[in-house]
């Protein structure tokens, strides 16, 4: 089971965010049975609440035997024409995500971007 969970976990993208704009994001810890956990970033403009992002992620992962917990949220300002992403703010329901972790994930996904973060702002 652990090997299967590990394989399912390895197929979960670290980052899934909208191509541009300002939108909410959540930092989610994904776990498989007996497998190590990994943190993923999900951010989309369609989400009215951070919980919408988390619930959609949980629904997508459940059939693969993966569970998840929300570590917090915030906002992303994605400006592809400037190759910049700014991470800031917090989630009322889940609290503030660790923006430093989110920034590292984004840097791995967007190596040619300038990625910044701040605890200020909503």
Image (cartoon, rainbow, N blue to C red):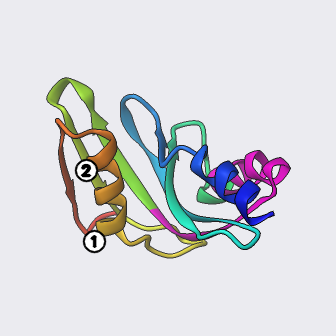
Determine which of the numbered discs, if any, sits on residue 92 in the image. none
* 25 over 118 or under it: above or below: above
**What residue appears at the point 27 percent right and 71 percent down from the top-left corner?**
119
**What residue appears at the point 25 percent right and 50 percent down from the top-left corner?**
86
Q: Position of residue 63 (x, y in %)?
A: 84, 48
On whether residue 13 falls in the magenta region, the answer is: no
Instruction: Find disc 2 in the rendering and name its residue.
Output: 86
On whether residue 59 falls in the magenta region, the answer is: yes
Q: Which quadrant of the rendered structure holds the N terminus?
A: bottom right
Q: What is the secondary structure assignment of the residue under circle 1?
A: loop
Q: Position of residue 81 (x, y in %)?
A: 20, 23
- Sequence order check, earlier mark of 1 and 2: 2
Q: Position of residue 101 (x, y in %)?
A: 35, 66
Q: Quadrant of residue 122?
A: bottom left
Looking at the rendering, the stretch of residues picked out in magenta corresponds to: 53-73
Q: What is the secondary structure assignment of the residue under circle 2?
A: strand
Q: Nearer the viewer, residue 65 or 7?
A: 7
Disc 1: CA contacts within 10 A as few (<14), some (14-19) or many (>=20):
some
Instruction: Find disc 1 in the rendering and name its residue.
Output: 119
Q: Is residue 24 left or right of residue 102?
A: right
What distance separates the C-alpha of mark 1 from that of mark 2?
11 Å
**What residue appears at the point 60 percent right and 72 percent down from the top-left corner?**
93
Q: Nearer the viewer, residue 117 or 93?
A: 117
Q: Are marks 1 and 2 in contact (CB under 8 Å)?
A: no
Q: Quadrant of residue 116?
A: bottom left
Q: Is residue 12 left or right of residue 34?
A: left
Q: Position of residue 118 (x, y in %)?
A: 23, 66
Looking at this view, name the residue that lies furthest to the top. Answer: 81
Q: Is residue 24 left or right of residue 89?
A: right
* 40 over 118 or under it: above or below: above
Looking at this view, name the residue that lies furthest to the right. Answer: 63
**What residue appears at the point 61 percent right and 47 percent down from the top-left corner?**
48
């Amino acid at each position: 089971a652990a090997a299967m969970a590990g394989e399912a976990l390895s197929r979960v993208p670290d980052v899934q965010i909208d191509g541009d704009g300002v939108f909410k994001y959540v930092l989610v810890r994904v776990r498989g049975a007996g497998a190590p956990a990994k943190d993923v970033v999900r951010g989309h403009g369609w989400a009215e609440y951070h919980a919408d992002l988390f619930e959609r992620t949980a629904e997508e992962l459940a059939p693969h035997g993966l569970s998840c917990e929300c570590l917090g949220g915030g906002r992303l300002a994605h400006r592809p024409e400037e190759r910049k992403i700014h991470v800031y703010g917090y989630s009322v329901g889940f609290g503030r995500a660790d923006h430093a972790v989110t920034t590292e994930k984004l840097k791995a996904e967007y190596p040619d971007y300038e990625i910044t973060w701040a605890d200020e702002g909503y």
